[in-house]
Image (cartoon, helix red, strand yellow):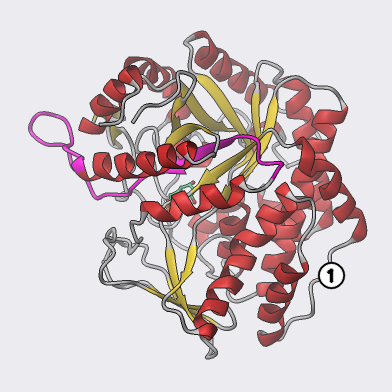
């Protein structure tokens, strides 16, 4: 199976997970700085020290056939308070980084928000607060005017996980649980902000392409029981439906709203009634989107659940400890016949195939990038200073096969970005969940190519998936 000549063989990063330097050069506080402090969490410094070592990482891209890099701008490097005065050092830093990538033939795909809301904004309700949405739009406009060297923009990374983990699972700051109303309003605020920024981008005639990156994983029913089928559809409505419909259709369908409202109702919350003005923005934006980014790691199987909410996050890699039973949304069942990672993520490439085919049905879905896919593994360097990560090669091959099959059947996937380019830390799983092509020794900050990096180089040069 062969990739087209213009297929992007990329690697993904996110500012907070790799930059380090959280207090350097005028950077302002983000919600994680305080959350990790208060919860005795992971130290984000120096992470993979990308702030200082980006040249080495981009050089590695060149050496290993990686011709696209996802980079996010840290909002508080540009506006330390989230608004107001601009921090020139932050602006200069990103100009230098983008220039280095472009000069070396590694195209930057730049995300404006990757989970790192300024601290005070997150405290004030994040995107469930209209003022935060307004400040984000201002920050986005500034970046679009300033970084004209960038040609590929994404407004957000993963609206659903960012919202649900803040307010339902409690694994992201502010760490609240089962607040389904805030989750929905946060999702809606981000989807509206995306639409506003996209409308601005196109109306002001800026060059380049803009899209959004959604976490889009498939939810199946565990069997053909009607109630379980409905549970899977409800989970899908809140996790995928809102995002897909708002972005590609420019409205929420009645079916999706009914299911979301059922979840709200059984949890004791008021109905979700989107503001008309927000819906107008979405309607206007949907036909303008240039690409959809899909992040996908696993698939899910659901069963009806009416009891009280229980959610246990497996953040340690102790296989079998994950539990999730959410009232009105369903119980997630792990199938014995499907392989799983140590963090209980079910490996099922067909889930990605089914999702690509689903979104491809929308007329506005002109182009797709797989903006994140990959496998977290506990890894150590061997005596040859490398990692024999055959499990990663196998995982990525099977997912790429799903991508190529989807393209054969009419989809238009134009690139794939491994999460992650080099090892970095995981928000709620720490430093022992490694994803990269390059092993990072976090003590010395030295990079070591893994077996998968050599495999990737060969693949990106031959364009032939064997
Ligand atoms: C996505 C995020 C990434 C990254 C990845 C892996 O949700 O966009 O930032 O963290 O998931 O997940 P985890 O770190 O939980 O293993």
Q: Residue furthest right?
A: 277
Q: Residue at x 63, y 53 (%)?
A: 159
Along the line of sight, which residue is nearer the eye, 241 or 357?
A: 357
Relative image position of residue 192 (x, y in whole percent): 79, 51
The image quadrant of residue 338 is bottom left
Q: Which residues are magenta?
A: 363-390
Relative image position of residue 427 (x, y in whole percent): 46, 52
Q: Residue furthest left?
A: 383
Q: Residue furthest front?
A: 409
- Give the position of the N terminus as an image quadrant: top left
> Compared with residue 228, is residue 215 higher up or lower down, i.e. above or below?
above
Looking at the image, residue 250 sits to the left or right of residue 107; the answer is: right
Give the labeled residue for mark 1: 273
Number of residues whose C-alpha sits closer than 10 Å to that of mark 1, classed few (under 14), some (14–19) or many (20 or more): few
Q: Residue at x 45, y 34 (%)?
A: 416
Main SS of the magenta part reads: loop
Looking at the image, residue 271 sits to the left or right of residue 59; the answer is: right
Provide the secondary structure element on which disc 1 rests: loop
Looking at the image, residue 388 sits to the left or right of residue 343; the answer is: left
- Give the position of the C terminus as an image quadrant: top left
């Amino acid at each position: 199976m062969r990739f087209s000549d213009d297929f992007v063989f990329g690697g993904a990063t996110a500012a907070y997970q790799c930059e380090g330097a959280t207090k350097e050069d005028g950077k302002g506080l983000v919600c994680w700085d305080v959350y990790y402090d208060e919860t005795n969490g992971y130290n984000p410094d120096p992470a993979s020290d990308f702030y200082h070592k980006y040249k080495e990482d981009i050089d590695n891209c060149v050496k290993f056939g990686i011709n696209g890099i996802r980079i996010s701008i840290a909002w508080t490097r540009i506006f330390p308070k989230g608004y107001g005065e601009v921090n020139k050092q932050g602006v200069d830093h990103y100009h230098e980084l983008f220039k280095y990538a472009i000069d070396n033939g590694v195209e930057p795909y730049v995300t404006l928000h990757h989970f790192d809301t300024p601290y005070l904004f997150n405290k004030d309700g994040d995107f469930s607060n209209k003022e935060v949405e307004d400040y984000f739009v201002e920050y986005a406009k500034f970046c679009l005017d300033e970084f004209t060297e960038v040609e590929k923009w994404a407004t957000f990374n993963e609206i659903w996980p960012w919202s649900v983990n803040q307010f339902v699972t409690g694994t992201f700051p502010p760490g609240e649980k089962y607040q389904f109303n805030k989750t929905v309003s946060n999702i809606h605020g981000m989807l509206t902000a995306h639409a506003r920024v996209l409308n601005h981008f196109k109306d002001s005639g800026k060059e380049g392409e803009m899209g959004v990156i959604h976490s889009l994983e498939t939810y199946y029913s565990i069997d053909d029981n009607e109630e379980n089928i409905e549970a899977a559809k409800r989970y899908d409505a809140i996790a995928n439906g809102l995002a897909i419909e708002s972005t590609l259709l420019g409205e929420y369908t009645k079916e999706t709203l009914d299911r979301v409202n059922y979840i709200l109702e059984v949890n004791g919350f008021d109905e979700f009634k989107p503001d008309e003005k927000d819906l107008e923005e979405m309607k206007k934006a949907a036909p303008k989107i240039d690409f959809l980014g899909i992040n996908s790691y696993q698939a899910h199987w659901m069963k009806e659940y009416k009891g009280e909410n229980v959610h246990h996050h497996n953040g340690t890699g102790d296989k079998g400890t994950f539990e999730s039973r959410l009232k009105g949304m369903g119980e997630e069942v792990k199938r014995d016949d499907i392989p799983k990672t140590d963090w209980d993520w079910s490996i099922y490439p067909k889930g990605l195939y089914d999702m690509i085919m689903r979104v491809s049905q929308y007329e506005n879905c002109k182009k797709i990038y797989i903006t994140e896919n990959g496998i977290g593994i506990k890894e150590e360097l061997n005596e040859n200073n490398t990692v024999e990560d055959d499990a990663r090669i196998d995982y990525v091959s099977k997912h790429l096969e799903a991508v190529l099959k989807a393209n054969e059947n009419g989809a238009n996937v134009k690139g794939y970005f491994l999460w992650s380019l080099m090892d970095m830390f995981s928000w709620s799983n720490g430093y022992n969940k490694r994803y990269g092509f390059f092993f990072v020794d976090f003590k010395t900050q030295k990079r070591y190519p893994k077996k998968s990096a050599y495999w990737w180089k060969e693949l990106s040069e031959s364009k032939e998936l064997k």
